[in-house]
Image: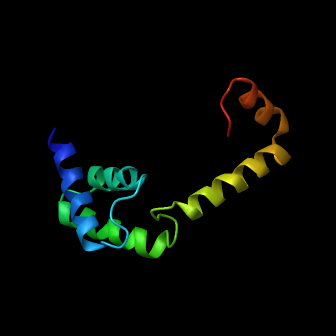
């Protein structure tokens, strides 16, 4: 329960720190990993800030534009490089 509260505080603080972005889907996974590996909440917050600002520029946005483009590229690569696996997944109702 404490871990969830730490995560919630980190994400709420980030949303206030970067109001033009706020909270976006997927941020919780990054923040959770940071929370697990850092003892201080503040360290995890600032690491999240650096990662989202410098390492994933444009990757997270309210529209998830960069993410959607990346998924489309991944789908095309899978179709081209792994056609059998791609068709198997599609056949199982699990589109890439």
92 on left or right of 62: right
For the residue pair 73 and 2, the one nearer the viewer reads as 73
For the residue pair 44 and 76, the one nearer the viewer reads as 76
Q: Residue furthest top?
A: 92
Q: Residue furthest bottom?
A: 54
- Residue 39: x, y in percent? 19, 56
- Residue 93: x, y in percent? 68, 26
64 on left or right of 5: right
- Residue 25: x, y in percent? 42, 52
Note whether 92 is above or below 78 in the view shown.
Answer: above
Image-quadrant location for residue 24: bottom left
Please state, as top left, top right, bottom left or bottom right, where the N terminus lies in the image.
top left
Which residue: 42% across, 74% down? 53
- Residue 71: x, y in percent? 64, 52
73 on left or right of 45: right
Which residue: 31% across, 73% down? 18
């Amino acid at each position: 329960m404490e871990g969830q509260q730490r995560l919630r505080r980190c994400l709420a603080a980030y949303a206030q720190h970067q109001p033009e972005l706020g909270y976006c889907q997927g941020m919780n996974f990054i923040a959770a990993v940071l929370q697990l590996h850092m003892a201080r909440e503040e360290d995890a917050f600032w690491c999240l800030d650096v990662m989202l600002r410098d390492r994933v520029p444009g990757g997270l946005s309210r529209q998830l534009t960069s993410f959607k483009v990346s998924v489309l590229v991944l789908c095309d690569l899978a179709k081209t490089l792994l056609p059998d696996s791609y068709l198997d997944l599609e056949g199982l109702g699990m589109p890439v």
